[in-house]
Amino acid sequence: MLQPPHSSLQVAGVPAQRVPARDRDQDAPWHTEAVCRRDEAGLFFAPSKEPTAARLSREEAAKRVCARCPVMVECREHALLQPEPYGVWGGLTAAERRVVLARRRRRELELKKAARATNRIAAAG
């Protein structure tokens, strides 16, 4: 099994039993429900010097696994908050996560600017 170059939380490739969410302990970590725990880690993390066509095919296959995962949102948020620099997490590649993070930062800046403008108007009025 291929190991990711960096991973603060290894979920892919770890065998697990499926426990229905309603029966699962609410304090259990989200990754205990991850569908990728039953798949090969190599699907989610690139081997060194992978050709572009093979990478795109592998990433699409990993995204299909993510699409049927009950904890995809939690996984994605984990990868965005860490931030995870490698692999497919929550249906997003590392490059796609960078785009999401940039959009979030831009949105936060816009909201802060709007709040400052509103405060100035309220103070002047």
Image (cartoon, grey):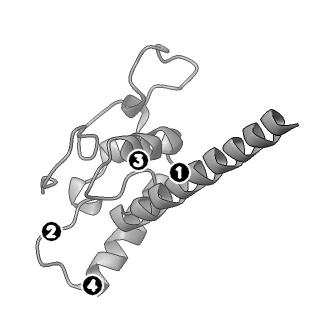
Marks 1/2: CA–CA distance = 24 Å
Give the foreground label among 2 and 3. 3
Residue type, label 4: Thr
Give the foreground label among 1 and 3. 3
Marks 1/3: CA–CA distance = 20 Å
**In the rendered image, which residue does mark 4 sit on?**
52
Marks 2/4: CA–CA distance = 11 Å
- From the viewer's perspective, is 108 left or right of 8? right
Mark 2 secondary-structure assignment: loop
**In the rendered image, which residue does mark 3 sit on?**
80
**In the rendered image, which residue does mark 1 sit on?**
68
* Numbered tag placed on residue 47 in the rendering: 2
Residue 118 screen position, x and y as percent? 77, 42
Query: Badge 4 local density, few (<14 within 10 Å), some, or many (20+)?
Result: few
Q: Answer whether residue 92 is visible to the viewer in this image.
A: no
Residue type, label 1: Arg
Query: Badge 3 local density, few (<14 within 10 Å), some, or many (20+)?
Result: some
Tell which circle, 4 or 1, labels the residue nearer the N-terminal end.
4
Mark 3 secondary-structure assignment: helix
Residue 19 screen position, x and y as percent? 45, 25
Closer to the camera, 109 or 19? 109
Marks 4/1: CA–CA distance = 25 Å
Residue type, label 3: Leu
- From the viewer's perspective, is 47 left or right of 62? left
Mark 4 secondary-structure assignment: helix
Give the foreground label among 3 and 4. 3
Residues tagged 3 and 4 counted as in contact (Cβ below 8 A): no
